[in-house]
Image (cartoon, rainbow, N blue to C red):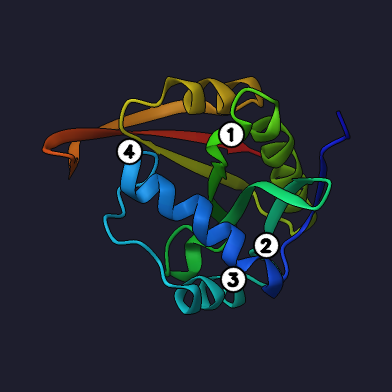
Amino acid sequence: MSAITVRDATDGDAAALMAIYNHEVQNSTATLDMETRTLEAQAQWLRARRGANPVVVAERNGEVLGFASLSPFRERAAYRTTVENSIYVHRDAHGQGVGTILLTALVERARLHGYHSVIARVAGDNPASVALHQRLGYEIVGTEREVGRKFGRWLDVTELQLLL
């Protein structure tokens, strides 16, 4: 099996990222988003994350296996050194170390951009995502109880934080 590589996302990745994300929207609580993205919306999302808010993709043999991104945590100036991460792995690539590779690369980029804190908000019942973050040094800092509703049930959001 070929090695998994990580690189910065390009505009040409929009369709692959859209497919991965939309599967999670429709089939899981990995995101509390309930509307799928169009290709144009995904392209706009990518364009909004240039520079200090990068998107990275993991690929093998040219196939995108997953992606991760940094986004502003809050709009107010005092929060500028804190970012929030997002990570999505293609359903066929689960259990192959893709999440660890992506999150490691994302933390490296957060350090390079001078951020102080990275927040992860894990929705629903997703112990694998919580465990992934904890393996890389994130600590659980709280649980927001029943703040989302998807698939006819209330969902908690676990908040984790990594101080860089």
Q: Which amino acid, by three-letter code, is at mark 4? A: Thr
- Give the Cα separation between the discs numbered 4 and 3: 22 Å
Which of the two discs, 1 and 3, sits closer to the camera?
1
In-front residue for pair 48/10? 10
Q: Which amino acid, by three-letter code, is at mark 3? A: Leu
The residue tagged 2 is 54
- In the picture, the quarter occupied by the N terminus is top right
Picture quadrant of residue 82: bottom right
Q: 10 Å neighbourhood of mark 4: few (<14), some, or many (≥20)?
A: many
Q: Which circle's residue, 1 or 2, is located before the other in the chain?
A: 2
Decide: marks 1, 2 in contact (CB < 8 A)? no
Q: Which circle's residue, 4 or 2, is located before the other in the chain?
A: 4
The residue tagged 4 is 29
- Give the Cα separation between the discs numbered 1 and 2: 24 Å
Q: 10 Å neighbourhood of mark 1: few (<14), some, or many (≥20)?
A: few
Q: Position of residue 7 (x, y in %)?
A: 80, 55
Q: Position of residue 152 (x, y in %)?
A: 11, 38
The residue tagged 3 is 46
The residue tagged 1 is 92
Query: What SS does tag 4 mark?
Result: loop
